[in-house]
Image: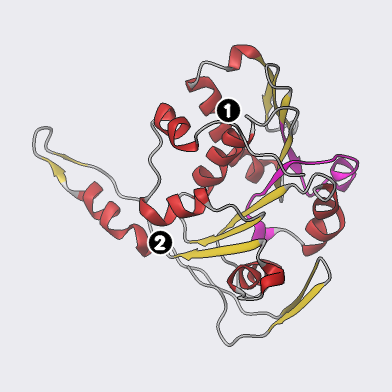
């Protein structure tokens, strides 16, 4: 049975001085579905969203939480957010921790609650076996092979009815698009899934604000660069007994 933290997400984020990008990102934080997919352009804050959610999940006693990246470098992004959160909360001194990207050794063990966060790489399939998981972040999900989720991660969260987040920049037609489509389905038997699509332009007002000249310092603040990428292919989604052929005319785009 899935267990949620016995703390206020809003109070935690306030203590971290983290403010989501408007109501859309708040909705994604507060969604209660097991499988949450964010398809978003660069600079939207996908890693921040997923990383702060990992911090929140670490307050579930006796929980095991993973970030699974296509490689350790990509998986480090969400881990970094959680690590800095624990530092800001003054909790790192009460944790056993390691942070070595090159050696693939990134973990936080919160002794007070017996909760664990580890980074795993899909390049090392042997490391994905044998754990009963409470929560997983599939970092840059569109870059993963579907077999990583179907054969290793999804079975590992079954016993505890664990949850999974799928933050990613879109990459054309692939299994990630299938996860997005599951989250958009009106079918009652798929109500464990939810998804959102946020183009980079969603942040345009924020970007423009950052371009305004600070009249006191007379220095403009650099704005992030917006990029676009898309690719066409076809794939078939097969997940938890549900098959859905993704053959729409348009790939997911930023």
Q: What is the residue that sits farthest to the left in this orientation?
A: 215
Task: Tell me which segment is drawn in magenta.
Answer: 117-143
Q: Is residue 79 above or below residue 100?
A: below
Image location (x, y in percent) of residue 157: 80, 48
Q: Is residue 114 above or below residue 151?
A: above
Pick the residue in front: 34 or 81: 34
- In the picture provided, is 208 more to the left or to the right than 224? left
The 10 Å Cα crowd at callout 1, few under 14, some 14 to 19, many 20 or more, is many
Q: In this view of the protein, can residue 113 be seen by the observer?
A: yes
Who's the residue at 70% across and 43% down the image? 135
- In the picture provided, is 215 more to the left or to the right than 51? left
Q: What is the residue that sits farthest to the top in this orientation?
A: 93
Image location (x, y in percent) of residue 143: 67, 59
Image location (x, y in percent) of residue 153: 80, 51
Q: Residue 117's mark?
A: none
Describe the element under mark 2 as helix, strand or loop.
helix
Q: In this view of the protein, can residue 44 be seen by the observer?
A: no
Task: Say which residue label 1 marks.
Answer: 83
Who's the residue at 83% across and 51% down the image? 158
Q: Is residue 96 above or below residue 136?
A: above
Image location (x, y in percent) of residue 124: 84, 45
**Which quarter shows the N terminus?**
top right
Q: Are marks 1 and 2 in contact (CB under 8 Å)?
A: no
Who's the residue at 74% across and 32% down the image? 63
- Is 125 colored magenta in this rendering? yes
Q: Quadrant of residue 242?
A: bottom right
Task: Say which residue label 2 marks.
Answer: 200
């Amino acid at each position: 049975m899935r267990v949620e933290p016995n703390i206020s997400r809003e109070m935690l984020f306030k203590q971290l001085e983290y403010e989501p990008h408007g109501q859309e990102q708040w909705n994604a934080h507060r969604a209660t579905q097991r499988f949450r997919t964010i398809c978003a352009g660069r600079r939207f804050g996908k890693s921040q969203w997923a990383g702060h959610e990992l911090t929140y999940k670490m307050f579930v006693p006796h929980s095991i939480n993973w970030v699974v990246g296509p490689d350790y470098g990509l998986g480090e992004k969400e881990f970094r957010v959680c690590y800095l959160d624990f530092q800001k909360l003054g909790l790192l001194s009460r944790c056993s921790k390691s942070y070595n990207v090159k050696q693939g050794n990134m973990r936080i063990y919160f002794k007070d609650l017996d909760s664990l966060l580890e980074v795993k790489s899909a390049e090392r399939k042997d490391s994905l076996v044998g754990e009963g998981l409470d929560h997983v972040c599939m970092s840059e999900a569109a870059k993963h092979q579907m077999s990583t989720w179907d054969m290793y991660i999804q079975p590992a969260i079954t016993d505890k009815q664990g949850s999974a987040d799928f933050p990613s920049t879109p990459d054309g037609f692939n299994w990630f698009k299938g996860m997005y489509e599951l989250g958009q389905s009106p079918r009652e038997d798929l109500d464990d899934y939810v998804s959102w699509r946020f183009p980079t332009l969603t942040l345009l007002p924020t970007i423009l604000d950052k371009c305004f000249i600070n009249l006191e310092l007379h220095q403009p603040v650099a704005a992030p660069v917006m990029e676009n990428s898309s690719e066409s292919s076809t794939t078939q989604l097969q997940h938890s007994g549900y098959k859905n052929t993704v053959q729409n005319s348009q790939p997911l785009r930023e």
